[in-house]
Image (tube, helix red, strand yellow):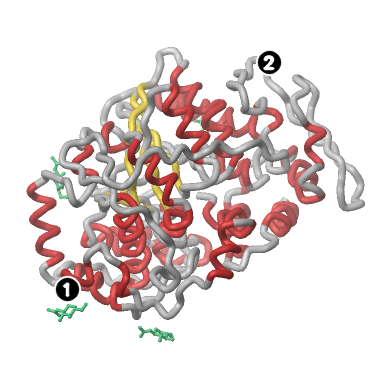
C-alpha cells in the first residue's frame, strides 16, 4: 500500500524541485493509511501507470471503473462498491465514482478580473484595492521553501516577539509524532495538536452555533479556485480562504476575486511546512511574508492564520499571536474524530471519492450530535478537491435534513469582517496589543512596500515559470493538508 502510494506520487511529482516534497508526501500518505481499504491500492496503481488510464472509468453510471496500464504492468481492476443513493453533481462536475487522481482534466474557469485598483470592498472601513500586483524578481523569497531569516524584513518582524513569552520548545522532526516519541508523549504540555489534538483557549476550533458549518478552503489560490468561487456565488455562500503566500504572488487576481466577493482571507504560511518543525525565526518568516503578500495584493492584512497540517504547539501559537494572527484549526469530536473532508486523500490517490463522500457524511452525522457548530478541513488547490466541494460536500450540507447553515469562519464566530483585518479592526484590545508589538519595530521596514527586499534567495525567472506551470501541481502536493 505504501509502496503503491509512493509510485503514484513519484509520477505526479515529476518536475518538482522543492526539496523534501517526496518525504513529506510519503509521510502524509503513509502515516494516515490505517483507515484505507484494500480497494485503494489498485486505484493507486492505475493512476501511477498512466494519467490517461482512468479515462476508461468515465461516467458510465454504475459500472465499476476499470483501469488499463500505460506502463506495461498487468492491468488491475478496481472494485469500488457504488451505493445506490449517490447524489448527482451539477453540470461540469464528473459523477462521484469518476473522480480520481488519474481522471482527465476538465476546463478551468476564467478569472473575470472585474475589480481594478481603487475598487472598494463591501465591509465598513475597508481601504480601496491597491495598484495591481506585478511580480518583481528580488522582492520576494523563493516560492515553496521557508524564506531566509537574515533579511531585513524578517529581522524587523522578529521584534514583534519582544516582551512576549515564547515557550522554549525545541522544533519537532517534521511535525511528525512518530519521529519524536518523547515530544509526542509530552504533547499535552506542549499543546501539540498533531499528536492528540491538543488546543489552547485562544485557538478557534468550532463555530459556537449548533448546525452551523464554518466553511473554509486551504492552500490556494489555484487555477481551480475560480470554479469554486462561481459556485459559491451562485449559491450565495461565503467561505474563509487560508492562502499560501507563494500562491498569492502567483495568482493575485484570484485572491482579489475571493476578497471582493465577500470571502474571508487568512494566512496559511509561505511554503506550507509543518510549523512546529521550524525555528522561531523561520516561523516569523513564513507568517510575515504571507502577511506581506496579502497586504500587497489586497491592501489589508489578516488577523487570523491556520497552521499547515494543523501542526501547532504552544511555541507556534505564541509566535502567531505575537504577530497578530489568531490560530484557526478544525473541529474534533470529544472522541477525537477530526473533521477532515479527506479531499486531499482523493487528490493523492489514497482514497476513492465514494469513500471520501461517505466519510464526509459521517462528519455531518457527528455534527448533528455535538453541541456546537463545526469547522472542516477542505482544499481548493486541486481540480479533484474543487470538484468534490462543488459537486458534493457543500450540497450535502445544504440539502441535509435538517439543513446546515454555511458561513465563513469569522462570521460563524460572530467576528465582524472589519476585525478579520489589521487595518480595519475596531477591537480595541487587539489594536492595543498590535501597537505594543509594532512599537518594537522599525515602521518603515514594516510597511507594505517590499521594494527594500534583500532576500538573497529570491525567485529567478526560471524558478518562477517552473512553479507557474507543471511545478505548481507538483509543489502543491506538499500541501495536501
Ligand atoms: C543571508 O544568508 C545567506 C547565506 O546563508 C547569504 O548568502 C546572504 O547574503 C545573507 N543575506 C543577508 C541580507 O545578510
Ligand atoms: C461519527 O463518526 C464515526 C466515524 O468516526 C462514525 O462511525 C459514526 O457513525 C458517526 N456518527 C454519526 C451519528 O454519524
Ligand atoms: C478582541 O481581541 C482580543 C485579542 O486579540 C480577543 O481576545 C478578543 O476576543 C477580541 N474581542 C472581540 C469582541 O472580538
Ligand atoms: C528604519 O529603517 C530605515 C531604512 O529602512 C532607516 O533609514 C531608519 O533609520 C530606521 N529607523 C530606526 C529608528 O531604526
- How far is mark 2 from mark 1, CA to CA? 63 Å
Give the vertical position of 353 relative to 280 (above or below).
Answer: above
* Label 2: how many Cα within 10 Å (few below 14, some 14–19, many 20+): few
Q: How many marks?
A: 2
Residue 56 placement (x, y as % from top left): 82, 33
Q: Nearer the viewer, residue 291 or 451?
A: 451
Residue 445 placement (x, y as % from top left): 22, 72
Quadrant field for ligand 3: top left
Q: Residue at x 35, y 64 (%)?
A: 289
Disc number for residue 185: none
Q: Is residue 462 visible to the viewer in this orientation of the structure?
A: yes
Q: Secondary structure at mark 1?
A: loop
Q: Which residue is mark 2?
A: 84
Which-is-in-front pick, marks 2 and 1? Answer: 1
Q: Residue at x 79, y 36 (%)?
A: 55
Q: Quadrant of residue 259?
A: top left
Farthest residue to the top: give it: 401
Q: Is residue 132 left or right of residue 106?
A: left
Q: Residue at x 66, y 36 (%)?
A: 106
Residue 213 placement (x, y as % from top left): 37, 29
Q: Residue at x 73, y 43 (%)?
A: 102
Q: Secondary structure at mark 2?
A: loop
Disc number for residue 442: 1
Q: Nearer the viewer, residue 460 or 51?
A: 460
Q: Nearer the viewer, residue 312 or 97?
A: 97
Residue 191 placement (x, y as % from top left): 32, 56
Amino acid at each position: 500500500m505504501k509502496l503503491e502510494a509512493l509510485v503514484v506520487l513519484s509520477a505526479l511529482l515529476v518536475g518538482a524541485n522543492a526539496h523534501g516534497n517526496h518525504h513529506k508526501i510519503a509521510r502524509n500518505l503513509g502515516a494516515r493509511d490505517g483507515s484505507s481499504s484494500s480497494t485503494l491500492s489498485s486505484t493507486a496503481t492505475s493512476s501511477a501507470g498512466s494519467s490517461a488510464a482512468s479515462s476508461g472509468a468515465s461516467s458510465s453510471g454504475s459500472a465499476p471503473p476499470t483501469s488499463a496500464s500505460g506502463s506495461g504492468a498487468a492491468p488491475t481492476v478496481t472494485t469500488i462498491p457504488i451505493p445506490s443513493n449517490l447524489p448527482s453533481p451539477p453540470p461540469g462536475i464528473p459523477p462521484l465514482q469518476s473522480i480520481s487522481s488519474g481522471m482527465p482534466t476538465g476546463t478551468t474557469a476564467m478569472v473575470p478580473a472585474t475589480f481594478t485598483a481603487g475598487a472598494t470592498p463591501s465591509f465598513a472601513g475597508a481601504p480601496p484595492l491597491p495598484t495591481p500586483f506585478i511580480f518583481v524578481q528580488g522582492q520576494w523569497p523563493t516560492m515553496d521553501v521557508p524564506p531566509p531569516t537574515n533579511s531585513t524584513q524578517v529581522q524587523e518582524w522578529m521584534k514583534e516577539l519582544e516582551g512576549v513569552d515564547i515557550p522554549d520548545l525545541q522544533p519537532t522532526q517534521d511535525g511528525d509524532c512518530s519521529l519524536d516519541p518523547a515530544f509526542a508523549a509530552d504533547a499535552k504540555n506542549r499543546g501539540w495538536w498533531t499528536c492528540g489534538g491538543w488546543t489552547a483557549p485562544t485557538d478557534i476550533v468550532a463555530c459556537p452555533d449548533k448546525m452551523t458549518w464554518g466553511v473554509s478552503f486551504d492552500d490556494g489560490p489555484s487555477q481551480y479556485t475560480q470554479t469554486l468561487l462561481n459556485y459559491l456565488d451562485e449559491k450565495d455562500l461565503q467561505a474563509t480562504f487560508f492562502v499560501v503566500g507563494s500562491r498569492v504572488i502567483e495568482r493575485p487576481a484570484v485572491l482579489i476575486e475571493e476578497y471582493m466577493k465577500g470571502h474571508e482571507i487568512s494566512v496559511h504560511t509561505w511554503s506550507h511546512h509543518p510549523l512546529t518543525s521550524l525555528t522561531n525565526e523561520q516561523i516569523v518568516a513564513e507568517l510575515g511574508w504571507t502577511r506581506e503578500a496579502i497586504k500587497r495584493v489586497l491592501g489589508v492584512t489578516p488577523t487570523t492564520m491556520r497552521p499547515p497540517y494543523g501542526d501547532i504547539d504552544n511555541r507556534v501559537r505564541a509566535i502567531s499571536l505575537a504577530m497578530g494572527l489568531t490560530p484557526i484549526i478544525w473541529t474534533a469530536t470529544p472522541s477525537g474524530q477530526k473533521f477532515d473532508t479527506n479531499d486531499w486523500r482523493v487528490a493523492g490517490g489514497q482514497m476513492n471519492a465514494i469513500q471520501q463522500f461517505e466519510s464526509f457524511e459521517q462528519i455531518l452525522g457527528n455534527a448533528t450530535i455535538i453541541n456546537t457548530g463545526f469547522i472542516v478541513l477542505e482544499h481548493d488547490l486541486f481540480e479533484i478537491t474543487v470538484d468534490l466541494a462543488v459537486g458534493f460536500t457543500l450540497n450535502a450540507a445544504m440539502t441535509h435534513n435538517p439543513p446546515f447553515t454555511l458561513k465563513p469562519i469569522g462570521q460563524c464566530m460572530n467576528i465582524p469582517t472589519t476585525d478579520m483585518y489589521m487595518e480595519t479592526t475596531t477591537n480595541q484590545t487587539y489594536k492595543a496589543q498590535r501597537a505594543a508589538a509594532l512599537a518594537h519595530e522599525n515602521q518603515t521596514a514594516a510597511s507594505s512596500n517590499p521594494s527594500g527586499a534583500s532576500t538573497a534567495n529570491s525567485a529567478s525567472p526560471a524558478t518562477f515559470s517552473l512553479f507557474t506551470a507543471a511545478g505548481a501541481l507538483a509543489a502543491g502536493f506538499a500541501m495536501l493538508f
